[in-house]
Image (cartoon, rainbow, N blue to C red):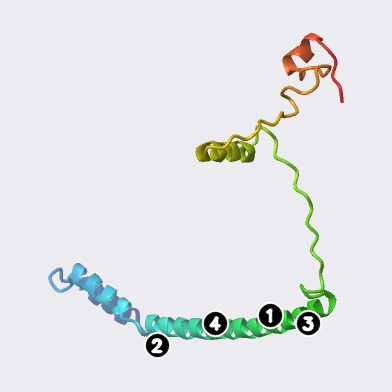
Amino acid sequence: MDRSENDLNALEARLGSWRPAPASLDRDRMLFLAGRASAGSEMRGRLVAISAVGLAMLAIGLGGLLVSEHGRRLKLERVIAEQVRDVVPSRDEVELVATPALPPAANSYLALSQRFLALAEGRMLPVLASPGQGGSPDRKPPLSPMGARRGEGSVEF
């Protein structure tokens, strides 16, 4: 096809004469309609539906795992209970031995609370000597850290 330069120049001249009409395009209206069209797109609705289905399948799968793990745990508890029952004697077979309790220290909370309760009831309890109080006369008083720094006395172990 031969085109002459005259035809091309005529087309260029015609295109060059065209000017957009300022009143025909409303930029704000066009942007509003474009945003409205993008908000109602089908792709977004499909994405939401696919996500919901996927999360539902995940929840069902995790629930199934939980149920199966619970069953395994109960089965293991039964096996361990049978093994323990075979190994550990019953309570009737075990002889309970009572060990004597040591008296509490004189300045402990337990001893002080027992003395307080006895005083409240009108009884008197004897005051027990604690290791640091009273004791034998040949025993030296405990060495303070400050005395040890000055070289007073000796440290005994």
Quarter of the figure that contains the N terminus: bottom left
Find disc 4 in the rendering and name its residue: 58
Residue annotated with mark 2: 2
Crowd class of label 3 (few under 14; some 14 to 19; many from 20; radius 10 Å): few
Tell whether 156 sits left or right of 19.
right
Relative to 28, is 107 above or below? above
Q: Is residue 14 left or right of residue 5?
A: left
Q: Distance between the residues labelled 1 and 2?
A: 88 Å
The mark closer to the camera, 3 or 1, is 3
> Label 4 amino acid?
Leu
Q: Hey, which residue is sitting farthest bottom in the picture?
A: 1
Of pointers 2 and 3, the one earlier in the residue sequence? 2
Considering only order in the chain, which callout, 2 or 4, is on the residue closer to the N terminus? 2
Q: Position of residue 110 (x, y in %)?
A: 63, 41
Q: Mark 1 points at which residue?
A: 73
Question: Which is nearer the N-term, disc 3 or disc 1?
Answer: 1
- For residue 18, which quarter of the picture? bottom left
- Mark nearest the camera among 2 and 3 is 3
Q: Give the label, 1 or 4, closer to the camera.
A: 1
- Mark pair 2, 3: CA separation: 101 Å
Residue tagged 3: 82
Mark whose residue sits in front, 4 or 2: 4
| Residue nearest the viewer, comparing 76 with 23 | 76
Q: Which of marks 1 and 4 is nearer the N terminus?
A: 4
Residue type, numbered disc 3: Glu
Residue 36, x across and y down, in percent:
26, 76
Give the structural element (helix, strand or loop) at label 1: helix
Q: In this view, does 96 lie to the left or right of 120?
A: right
* Residue nearer the viewer, 16 or 48: 48
